[in-house]
Every structure is written in C-alpha cells, then in structure tokens.
Amino acid sequence: MRKNGFLVMWQLLQLVKPLAHIMMFTITMGTLGFLSAIFIMVLGAMGLAHLLGFDGHLNLTQILTALITLAAARGILRYLEQMSGHYIAFKLLALLRDKVFSALRRLAFVKLQDKQAGQLVSLVTNDIELLEVFYAHTIAPIMIAFFTSSILMAVFAHFSLWFALIALSAYLCIGVVLPITTTRLAREDGRQYRELVGEMNDFFLDSIRGMKEIQLFGYAKKRLNEIQQRSQFIDQAFRKIKDQEGKVRIYTEIAVSAFNIVILFTGLILFYLDEIDFAGFLVGVILLMSSYGPVIALCNLSSNLLQTLASGERVLSLLAEQPVLKDVESAVNLENVSEISVENLSFAYADEQILTDINFQLRKGQILGIHGRSGSGKSTLLKLLMRFYDPQQGKVCINGTALADINTASLRDNMAYITQQTYIFNDTIEENIRLAHRSATQEQIIEVAKQASIHDFIMSLPEGYQTKMAELGGNLSDGEKQRIGIARAFLHNAPIILLDEPTSNLDSLNEAMILQSLRNVKADKLIILVSHRQSTMAICDQVISIENGRMS
C-alpha cells in the first residue's frame, strides 16, 4: 500500500524528536542568515536613496557599518546552520541504520526469505543515504522559509499593505503551490527510479554470483544485453526526474519575474499616489526581489523529494513490518534441557497443509532421525522446533514447557541449527567458526574442527585457520562449507542440536566421521537429524519417517 507523501514526511519527522533542540538552533541560524543576506540588499537600496537625496533614515556611515556587520554575520550564521543541520542528518542516518538492522534481525528468519538481497542492499545503503537530503536540506529550509517570510511580511506591511499582499502571494505560489504540485505530478517517477535501482542491484548481484554458470552455458552476451536494457530503463526514469527539475526551474523563474513586475508597477502606482515615498518604493521593491531565496529553496526541494520520499517510504515500510512471531521476553528461561516432546502437531502454510498429526518424544542422550523424501515436510518440522512458526494444532514442549512460553533468546541459546546451506562470511576460517561463540579460544576452535572432520583440510591450506574466505565461500566445496557449519554447531555447545541434511554433500568417509562425532557428543545432547540417506539414520536411537506431511 502506497503512503501519502505528507504521511511519509511526518513519520520521518518523528525521528528528529531526540535532536529537536539542535534542529531549533539550525532553524534559528538559517533564518537569521537569510535575513542578513536580504537586508544587505535593503541597506544597499537605502544607501542609493540617500545618495539620490531622499531620506533613507540612516546616514552612509551607519549603512556601511551595518553592511559590514551583516556580511560577517551571514558567513558565520550560514556555517553554524550547515554544521548543525548536517550533524542532525548524519546522527539520524546512523540511528536509522541501527533501526533497519534491528528490523532485519527481528524479521529473520521467515520474513527475509521473501526479500531480494539486492533490494535490501539498496535500502540499507542508497535509500538511507538519500534521507540525508530530507534531514539536512528539507526540514530546516521549510521552517526557515516560514519564519523568514513571516518576518518579512511584517516589514512589507510597514511600507504598504499592498506590498505585504503581493509578497504573501509570491511566497505561497513559489514556496507552497509549485513544490506541492510538481511533487505530486512526478512522485511516481521517483518511486519507479528507486525500485528500478533495487531490481538492478538484485540482477547484478545474481550475475556476479552466477558468473561461472553464465560462462559455462554461453549466456554472457545475453546477460550483458539484459543488464544494458535495465540500465536504459533506469536512465529513462532518471531523465524523467531531471526533466521535472528543469520544468520546476522554468516555472520558478516565470513566477519570480511575474511577481517582480507586479511589485514594481504596484510600487510606482503607490509612489504616484503619494502613498509611499521614493525610499519606501525602492526599498520595498528591492526587498521582495532579494527575498525569494528561502522559498526558491523550497521549490527546488521538490525534485530531490521525488527520490527522498520513495526512499523514505521503503525504509519506513521495513521498519513497520511485523515478524511472523514476536520474540518472547518475559517468560521461562531453559535450564538443564532433558526432553523434547511433540504432540499432535499440524501445520499449514499459505493454505497448503505441510504437516499433519506429528508425535514423538526425545530424551537427553538420544539421537532422533527424521527420514523422508524431499518436500515431505522434514525441514519445516525443524523450523517449528526453532519456533520460526507456530503450529495451527498441537504443541512442541521442552522440559514440559510449550515453546510459546519460553523466552526466545533462551530458546536460541539452547539450540544449534544447521541448515542445508551454510553461509560463509568474507573472513578467516577461524572467525567463521568463532561466529557460534565469540569468546572461544583457538584451542576450542581446533577441537570442534577436528570433531567436524575439517581440521586436516584447514591445516592443508597455506595460512591454515587464518585463510581468508572468498565471498560466499567461493573457494570451498559444498562439503567443506557444511563441515564448517557443523563445527559452528559443536562450538555453540547447545544441549539441542538440529541438523538438516548435514551429510548430503559429504562422501562416505567424511559422513562416517561426522556421524562418529555425533555419537561422541550425544551423551549430554538431544540431537535431531534430518536426512534422506538411510546410512545416516544408522546412528539414530529412534527414527520416524514422514511421507506427504504424515508419519508413516
């Protein structure tokens, strides 16, 4: 569901509350800075009137002193405005990144399965970075324009109510009507551009990861053409945004010129009717002509806001997204895990029945094997044990306590879960294993590597445990990745170990080593082993078979 632009801005604005005092300082400095620049021109007009022999209320010495003072103040005020404005912006960007990563952690594991990696990369980097435009160059300019225009309206009213009326019309037209109209007309272009960039990130990331397959199957030329085609779509969307920026500048210049002509003729008429003197005429006209800066800044915002609002909407949508299950925080902590029981468990996903009436009991020191063909629901059962989902019927209990009544952090601490695909980080082998226990010593890491039958392979590498892994573990075979995953599980030293096809990518020798390792550690563990291999089931104390979601 698309959000209204004003709603997006309002929600982004709520994040400024902790830094509201600094924002007020920024607005004050900006307002005073613009007034200094405007009144430099006004003082010049007063000096000209004085030289022409008209009463300018100030002598040349006073005017010159004021000009020097305002010029110096303008520089200092501008610096303070920019410094404080960007301090707020980058402070909030850091806060937003923290919130986004917290949201990603909250949404894992289930919700992130449906999201493209490239889209998330684009959101965490480009989208958040674009919000700097909103926080540093949107909020303060809007308030500065409001306060500056309000003060100037009072000055215009001092000369003539007609001047005040023309100024009000000019400020509303250039600072309100034009930005709102152009933003509404072209907002879809900004949203489309951000979506195309995210899709391009996905496509390019896939191309890099699948480079070997692309070359092997002669797909390189076609893939390159597809990248070029997507680049053209992005270019077209970007051109639309730039065309809109050009139109905004044209409309702004036309409006400024029109109001300058109006106030010039109005001033001449008022001077002719003796309602103002020549100094009042000259100062009033120069004042309006030099006061467009704050409202023109608002008009120029519209082009930047096209992308900023689209980025803000994507970020806010992620922050507002709710996980399938919320973490439990004020419940039972697991201690001395000795039993897992599954009673009459049934689960459906997206109206498809996955598991029906599953029952088993597992005690400490036992290995439970779950056997079945691919797609029978074995992996889903492990996810239910991890409480990534809640079953529609039945329950899973640990030590007699239902999973929903156990603190999520405690549940995760007491489980080690090895999936079919082990993710390898772009770091050393040692750090990849240490992921499961950040304070582990090198001796502990070597021990679990031996248990996982990966130590000899690691020592065969030139740099041993300090060998740097390529992105996604590109310099490892699937079997080697899987054994690193098993080493992580052993290092985590959780009482419950869940293994999803842990030997699927191993040869018979390494499979036997891994299974022997599981036998060696099972005395104080509860191990659930999912596999379609009959040879893997040989070490299990009990085996259940699942066929089409049912025990058989």
Image (spheres, rainbow, N blue to C red):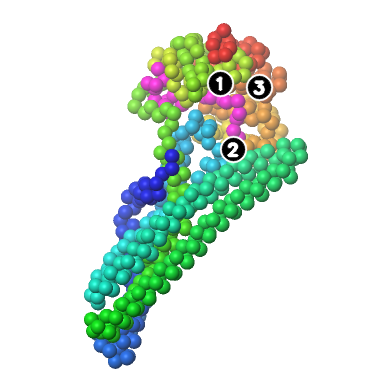
- Give the class, few, some or many, for how many residues have Cα within 10 Å of label 3's Cα (few <14, many ≥20): some
Q: Is residue 520 visible?
A: no
Q: Which marked residue is nearer to the observer: mark 2 or mark 1?
A: 1
Where's residue 528, x and y in %? Answer: 54, 16
Read off the residue under disc 3.
504
At 39% from the left and 69% from the top, the residue drawn is: 293
For the point 44% across and 21% down, the residue is: 390
Q: How many marks?
A: 3
Q: Nearer the viewer, residue 29 or 405?
A: 29
Q: Which residues are magenta?
A: 402-426
Of badges 3 and 2, the one in the foreground is 3
Q: Which residue is mark 1?
A: 379
What residue is disc 2 on?
Answer: 425
Q: Is residue 86 magenta?
A: no
What amino acid does circle 3 point to? Ser
- Specify the amino acid type for callout 1: Ser
Find numbered disc 1 in the image and state the secondary structure of the residue it sits on: helix
Q: Measuring from the top left, give residue 147's x and y in whole percent.
A: 30, 64
**Percent x, y of residue 291:** 35, 71
Secondary structure state at the residue bearing disc 3: loop
- Whether the residues at callouts 2 and 1 have beta carbons within 8 Å, the answer is no
Toward which corner of the image does residue 499 lie, by quadrant?
top right
